[in-house]
Image: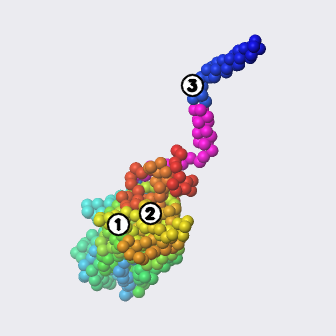
Amino acid sequence: MAKKKKKKKNNNLINLNQRRRFSNINIGVIIFAVMFIYIVICVVLFFTKGHVNRYEVKKGSLSLSNVYTGLILRDEEIVSANASGYINYFAHEGEHVACGDLIYSLDQTGHMADIMQDTTSSEMLSANDLKELRNDFIDFSHNYSDQKFNVTYDFSYDALGSVLKLTNYNMLSNLKSTDYKGNVDFFYAPKSGVVVYNIDGYENKTPDTITIDEINAIDDSTKTQLNDNELIGDKDPVYKIIHSEKWSIIVLVETSRIAQLEEEGYVEVKFLKNQNISWAKVNVLERGAEQSLVELQLNNSMISFAKDRLLDIEIILENENGLKIPNSAIVEKEFYLIPKEYAATDEKGNVEYFMRETVDENGAVITEKLDIPIYSESETDYYVDTYSLRVGDNICKPDSMDKYPISKIGTLIGVYNINKGFADFKEITILYSNDEYSIVKSNTNYGLLEYDYIVLDAESINEDDFINE
């Protein structure tokens, strides 16, 4: 009996020691250990899983290069001399003359030039003449560029010619009061127009005869200045006259912009020479792989550039503002197309669901409602995602026995919106792009809104992925 009691006493001691060991375990230590393991797992996932950089969509505009050098084409006529002699001009270059106005004289003996040279020292330019010359020098100074130094020579000829013509005009009145009977013929404008004293070989060119290669090779080196007091021969060109205020500027434009220009129809053109702005009609002459030939047709401002053949302009486009997004965020995605008549709609025409016909595991044909998100629509079809459907699935037409088997696939251009914490495709309409950014329409159906967050690099994520920022 004594041995049995001793064994029972030992068992009680063992149970007591076990209870004491469990009572020494702190519940706080267990909770801390669980939290520590959770944090370690999160840290490991954080550093092993790729991160998604987000971009906040805001309104903006692109830094576009809309500046072009264009070729001016006009209704021009070269007038040639019908005799030889020393020529003296009396009409101001770049100004409009009426029919019958004095343009120039031909002195076959040269005596008139001597008389005019003798009277030059006593002649002074009027205040208006000096003002006109001063304005020419100021315009040249403001528009001077080292990259186009060759225009300096043209300007020097223009300035010298202007001085001589102004002087000739003033001295003509003095000659009329003398008894000079020299062999001098005076010539008058046969038509009204703008007089110019240079030729360059493009006077007979028309927009339909210009090519892309020809535009690339054009420069101002072909211009020949017609100077005062020079000896000319019979049939030599003496001046040209511009008959119409209608004119064209031929420019080479990136082919990627042609659709935008054609959609505009008319564009604002800023003349960099005087900073004035005018409207021009767009006419595409020739399409190239990278560059296309475009004619800008104008009905005013021609006289300001009558002496120019090449002109620097800026094309001002209205729709360059919109939502600005990086090109790295843009992705192209495939969708199934379902005809609109196969969608069940409410009284307001909003899509509620689609009905899909399926076969269960027992071979029975059943229909089920599918609440599928719509990503875009055309005139005839809805674009739905490819996760809920398969090619060959039948979509039932409401209140009809007609069925549509899923077969057609279309593509949309868009970005991944992450406002809700997962990647959700949103269609975009690109207005214009450069190498880094695109301008897209705002407030479109199924599209983006200002201040939306999108995935910066579309290739770093799949649709419906949860975002780990």
- Of all residues, the one furthest to the right in this rendering is 3
The numbered mark, 1 or 2, whose residue comes first in the sequence reads 1
Residue at the extreme top of the image, as rendered: 2
Residue lying at 37% horizontally and 61% vertically, measured from the top left: 444
Q: Which mark is residue 345?
A: 1
**327 above or below 35?**
below
Most extreme residue toward the front, as rendered? 1
Who's the residue at 45% across and 65% down the image? 368
| Relative side of 50 to 426, left or right | right
**In the image, which residues are magenta?**
34-59
- Residue 209: image quadrant is bottom left
Which residue is identified by label 2?
A: 370
Nearer to me, 461 or 257:
461
Residue shown at 52% from the left, 44% from the top: 469
Q: Position of residue 289 (x, y in %)?
A: 53, 74
Give the spatial CA distance, label 3 vs label 2.
Answer: 49 Å
User: Which structural element holds mark 1?
Assistant: strand
237 drawn magenta? no
Residue 58 part of the magenta segment: yes
Q: Which amino acid does label 3 sit on?
A: Gly
Asked if residue 185 is positioned above or below residue 431 in the image, the reply reads below
Q: What residue type is labelled 1?
A: Thr
Label 3 SS: helix
As measured in the structure, the alpha-carbon distance from the residue carrying label 1 to the one carrying label 3 is 57 Å
Q: Position of residue 360 (x, y in %)?
A: 53, 66
Quickly name the residue at label 3: 28
Residue 231, horizontal then vertical, whole percent: 42, 79
Q: Do the residues labelled 1 and 3 touch (CB within 8 Å)?
A: no
What separation in Å lies between label 1 and label 2 (alpha carbons)?
Answer: 13 Å
Asked if residue 402 shows in the view, the reply is yes
